[in-house]
Image: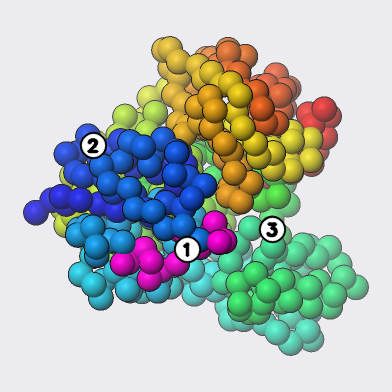
Amino acid sequence: MGFKRVLIANRGEIALRILRTLRDMGIEAAIIHGKEDRLSLPVMMSDIAYPNYRTNPLDSYLDIEAVVNAAKELECDAVHPGYGFLAENAQFVKRLTEEGITFIGPSSDVITLLGDKIEARAAMEAAGLPVAKGSSEPISDEKVASELAEEIGYPVIIKAAAGGGGIGMQIVEEESQFASALKLCMSRAKSAFGDERVFVEKYIQGAQHVEFQVLADGKNAIHFGERFCSIQRRHQKLVEEGPWLSDEKRSEIGDLVCRGAESVGYKGLATFEFLRDSNGDFYFLEVNPRVQVEHTVTELITGYNLVELGIRVAQGEDLPLSQSDIKWRGHAIQCRLNAEDPKEFVPSPGRLWDCHFPSGFGIRCDTHAHPGYEMPGCFDSLLAKLLTWGHDRDDAIRRMRTALDETQITGVQHLIPLHRRIMDEEDFLNRDVTIQYIDNHQELLG
């Protein structure tokens, strides 16, 4: 039996993205929302809007019991978490399961496993995925950690076991830096994630960030190829594109990620993230157990609605596709149009006095923005995702230049000037891009 009504436990462009797919599938769309989003497009377009006003705006979306109660009151069959907020919260999944409500994503046990980077690393290594040299258990003793770092060879990176992003990482170039770096990383991990456990891993220099899109039904898994996402600021992606690898390498890594998903009984959409060194070798980073911001890139080059496929699997359907059904056509690029100062990347909330987003052949724009929209300062700064498709990479880049030039946003600062400069930059055009790209091209910041 298919879902009749689904609660969207999110906001912004991803809430609108999910809502549209539910409409396509003939499923009623309910949405929970805070006061700041009461006039937003996803709330206005939903079949049922459930206000959950809190003093702290984040609590409107992070209060587990409030979201569960909303789903119960509205008699929803399922909850779609989107990304962020409660999307990777195992306790939330457990509570929904207790109430007989389907979580559109993996089980709480799988989320718990993959949310612990040490456990996830061990599980994927056992499934045959390549991992960088490092500790297989948490390390708190400075002497043990330092000896391991010497064995691995500097530089190393200290990572928080319970979380990601820049907060949970510290690069150490030499032994003299190790003690203070370990203490700092443990302190930050405790503060940010409530868990001070850290581990040590070989730092991959000159690395590229490559991720693979996977769909699994709890038994079998297929992949939709890779996305290249090395242009980042503070470990947050700015530009994503695909495809990037040769057919042979895609097939090789694709087989491995499917094996990894099947080994843990994964159900739903997942993204397997890797660092690729200058020799072309891959090292497993983590699994994101949810839909990704950049899933849109894969949709453009494969022609499949990933959000719909994730919902179908959650309904209990077997995989509707086999690996041989997935073909890659052309090239796609996504630019994240964040409401931020394009030099310091400081959020720029405020009212959009006017805005115009491009359209036409090979262009897609996912946004909840409109003239008069009040961009709140208390949430993520993502305003729109602008994508172009081309017959090849050069074609997609040319189209992105045109699309960026056509985009008009007034009232807030945004990253369009930065993206426009990237599209003309020589190293970018030559595919000479690593995760240090922005640090190495400060002239792009204006």
For the residue carrying disc 1, how many other residues have a C-alpha within 10 Å: few (<14), some (14-19), or many (20+)?
some
**Residue 62 - label:** 1
Q: Residue furthest right?
A: 176
Rounded to the nearest angstrom, the CA distance separating label 2 from label 1 is: 25 Å
Dot placed on the residue nearer the N-terminal end, 2 or 3? 2
- Measured as percent of width and height from the top left, residue 418 is found at 71, 28
In the image, residue 237 sits, relative to residue 264, either above or below, namely above
- Residue 23's mark? 2
Viewed as shown, does residue 406 lie left or right of 260? right
Look at discs 3 and 1 and give the one toward the viewer: 1
Secondary element under disc 2, as helix, strand or loop, is: helix
Dot in front, 2 or 3: 2
Q: Is residue 413 visible?
A: yes
The Cα–Cα distance between marks 2 and 3, rounded to whole angstroms, is 37 Å
What's the magenta region? 55-69
Looking at the image, do the residues carrying marks 3 and 1 touch, with CB atoms under 8 Å apart? no
Q: Position of residue 354 (x, y in %)?
A: 58, 21
Residue type at tag 1: Leu
Per the image, the residue denoted by label 3 is 166
**What's the residue type where badge 2 is placed?**
Arg
Taking the spot 39% from the left edge, 28% from the top edge, the residue there is 300
For numbered disc 1, what is the local secondary structure? helix
- Quarter of the rendering occupied by the C terminus: top right
